[in-house]
Image (tube, rainbow, N blue to C red):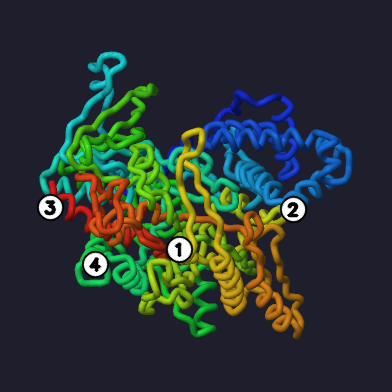
Amino acid sequence: MTTTPAPASARSVGPPTPEPTGWSPAALRTLALVAETISAGDGARRARLAAAALDLAADPAQVVQLKLVLRAFEIRAANLLLTGRPVRFSDLGQADREAYLLAWATSRVPQRRTAYQGLKRLLAFLAFADPGETGDNPRLRAIGFDVEPEPVTDEPTPIRPLDLAPLAAATPPGEAIVLQADIVIVGSGAGGGVIAAEAARAGRSVVVLEAGPFLSEPEMPVDELSAFDRLYLNHGFNVSWDASIMTLAGAGVGGGTTVNWMTCIAPPASTRRHWTTAHGLDGFDGPELDADIATAMTEIGVSPSPNVPPKDALILRGCTELRQEVGEIQRNGVGCGDCGRCGFGCRRGAKQSGLRVHLAEAWRAGARIVPDAEVSRVLLDGARATGVEAVATVGGRPWRLIVRAPQVVLAAGALRTPIILERTGIDHPATGRHLRLHPVGVIGAFLDEDVVMWRGTMQAARALHHLDIDGDGIGDGPNDAPGGFIVESAPGTPGLIALVFPWEGRDAFDGLMRRIRHVAPIIGIVREKGSGRVHLSRAGRPRIDYTVSPEDRRTLGAMLAEGARIAWEGGSREMVAVGAPPRWFRAQGGPGDGRAFDAWQAGLRGFSFEPNRGTVVSAHQMGSARAGGDPAGYTADPAGRVRAADARAGKDRLVRGLYVGDASAFPSALGVNPMITTMAWARRVARTVLAEG
């Protein structure tokens, strides 16, 4: 692999300031004032960017509610009821506006906390993710973030997507573009890519449909705002209905493999045993899956991390002092370790993503890959799948696209696979339910040295001590799953950091961001016992309903406490548990520091994780079309075949030719980063597809 420096002209500039429709001048003025209250400068631009993003990505009902909130900010009578003062938000000075927002942040009324988090996260993110119209955001200079683009690969991306333009030109107006295939695969991430490669290698005619765009590696974004807009599901604006959990998911050719942090961890033995014993996935704890895991690791070139950045060294030191299990992470990158832009896509071509491995192999074997094609439903003839219907963007215009195929694999991710089933009318009672998100809590640990979390290897250390990796995984039933959490670092980039980290007033926030080079974020990924749901809203858009269960809240509190202990033993003497309000610890340099820390750390176990109190984020989604033995309780059977809506215990009716090939099929929370397990599951499904095709 060779690279050349990016041309100076490749330096990122932000989009022109939009003029959103449907927003009154008064609402935009109030939104701009909130933006200025959070972080000074360019408030009007951020308000317009935020309004345009909400119109594009949020559910109309959520937008209406936010507009009502902004309107209430300016109604004296409403504020008299809410604050005891008959004032307008715009009449307040900076200090009073800050107090106003902070009162919403910590309100006993959940809807007020929801409104605050929706405003704070979006406007703070834009403050640091938007490079500005001239590409010279002063906030990025202030924190020392390098905005220059990375070198780009000299090797062409080994995929050429199918050009639908000639077919569209030959299609009469009002009619659909039609493709024929043996197998159509919906989604091009870790699951869809593996199945595409296996099927194409076996000589099958394969079409892969991806709702997101195709970007060759040199075209990958160089700024955070563009990356979220172009390569993440729902343009990065993907939150639970009450805004308490933000979820990140890839949405482009390659799916999550294009933007993930390359962390490769095999499924824990306890999870494998639980899925086999309690959920009926026969053989998932046996040698066949061992071989599938080994194959996945080999195909994507899994190798040790080339270096251990300071944020990860802190975890290694702390766990070693505590005599807890800890180790270095393996990842699927070649010839890199200094960039830190993995979440923007890999311009260097170093990441062994689907673009370079499975999708590339499928394309070389004849598979047709169609980007910008959002599947709406599966086509059925009775209880048999016959293809899919999609809307494809061709030359900037929407076209109806039909792919006729006797076998259909859904691998659109756990936030979209069940939506396709719901739109199709296959409303099995489990579909959309049992959604797991691996909720994540955050400790920000300050170090004297430069950490620069956004540079170098993304994640190089993980601690499995609290995960129950070798337990028997056997409980009283499917709901008695193994729990615990895994500790890792988080390589945040400025917008993501601003979105997640606490806001306690404008000056305090600016001061925190100016020190962010010294912060090592320690995260705990919880193998949750509870679950949520994804389904269509009244407006016909995907809606995520997820409330962290009481047991999982306790696990998140334990994670904060243990993460803080790891940071302390690793050498940090200042840290923050992230939430609203946050909890800070700052050592004074005296003999009582240890006792003070012990008391603070013990208190973290009671940290509130009610919605929009303790900060919870997610980058892993699974379980919403789960596979298992009981026809009444699982959308798919143990081989990935989709069950009909009327499946009941003892009556295992299948939709012939329809399969689930992604993490939607996981019966419970996995417990570790899911890419390797998703690939192993996909190989299992691929064998079923090929045997039945």
Q: Secondary structure at mark 3?
A: helix
Give me the residue at 32% from left, 43% from top.
Answer: 187
Residue beneath label 1, please? 459
For residue 345, side relative to residue 276 (left or right): right
Q: Are marks 4 and 3 in contact (CB under 8 Å)?
A: no
Crowdedness of circle 2 by 10 Å Cα count: few (<14), some, many (20+)? some
In this view, the mark in front (1 or 3): 3
Residue beneath label 2, please? 107
User: Closer to the N terminus: mark 4 or mark 3?
Assistant: 4
Query: Residue 193, image x and y in percent?
Result: 27, 48
Residue nearest the observer in this picture, 243 or 525? 243
Residue beneath label 4, please? 282
The alpha-carbon separation of the residues under discs 1 and 2 comes to: 35 Å
The alpha-carbon separation of the residues under discs 1 and 4 comes to: 33 Å
Q: Amino acid at mark 3?
A: Ala
User: Closer to the N terminus: mark 1 or mark 3?
Assistant: 1
Residue nearest the observer in this picture, 135 or 176? 176
Q: Secondary structure at mark 1?
A: loop
User: Closer to the N terminus: mark 4 or mark 2?
Assistant: 2
The alpha-carbon separation of the residues under discs 1 and 3 comes to: 38 Å
Query: Residue 369, image x and y in percent?
Result: 26, 37
| Residue 407 can be seen in this image | yes
The alpha-carbon separation of the residues under discs 2 and 3 comes to: 57 Å
Q: Are marks 1 and 2 in contact (CB under 8 Å)?
A: no
In this view, the mark in front (4 or 3): 4
Q: Secondary structure at mark 2?
A: loop
